[in-house]
Image: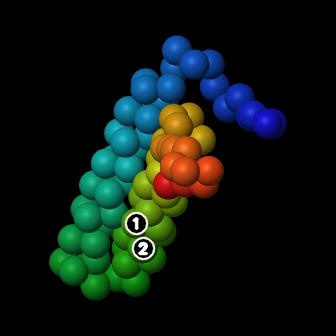
Amino acid sequence: MLTFVFSPRWFYGIDIISEIFAVIVTLLISIFSFKIYRFCEDKKYKYLALSFFTLAVAFFFKILTNINVFYEVTKQKMAEGLVLTY
């Protein structure tokens, strides 16, 4: 089986924690810029909020992908000659 190494094994948990921090920061920037948009109703702040929210969603899905790659989330069982994978 071919495996890809994205970072050292000792850095796996720390890497995900730093990405969670990035999601939180981008969400806070998005919320703050949306509040500014509601205050002054300038469209550039609305687009800034939307772009940072999109970045936060992208970081979140990157975390889910990294968890799937770094850790074994699928299990296999042998039951009466059948291989069950879940």
Q: Within 10 angstroms of label 2, few (less than 14), some, or many (20 or more) residues?
A: some
Name the residue nearer the viewer: 62 or 43: 62
Most extreme residue toward the top, as rendered?
10
Q: Quadrant of residue 27?
A: bottom left
Mark 1 to mark 2 CA distance (whole Å): 5 Å
Instruction: State the residue position of label 2.
Output: 50
Give me the residue at 35% from left, 82% from top.
42
- The correct choice, above or below, for 64 with respect to 49 in the image is above
Residue found at x 43% / y 24%: 14
Amino acid under disc 2 = Leu
Q: 10 Å neighbourhood of mark 1: few (<14), some, or many (≥20)?
A: many
Report x, y in % for residue 21. Answer: 35, 39
Residue 48 shows up from this direction: no
Location of residue 66 by image quarter: top right
Residue placed most toward the observer, 2 or 66: 2
| Left or right, 84 with reference to 53 | right
| Res 47 quadrant in image | bottom left
User: Dot 1: what SS?
Assistant: helix
Quarter containing the N terminus: top right
Q: Is residue 2 visible?
A: yes
Q: Position of residue 59 (x, y in %)?
A: 48, 53
64 sits to left or right of 24: right
Q: Which residue is mark 1?
A: 53
Residue 26: give its label. none
Q: Amino acid at mark 1?
A: Phe
Q: 41 or 1, which is in the foreground?
A: 1
Q: Nearer the viewer, residue 15 or 77?
A: 77
Residue 85: x %, y % from top left: 55, 53
Tell me whether the residue at label 1 lies in contact with that at label 2, contact meaning CB atoms closer than 8 angstroms. Answer: yes
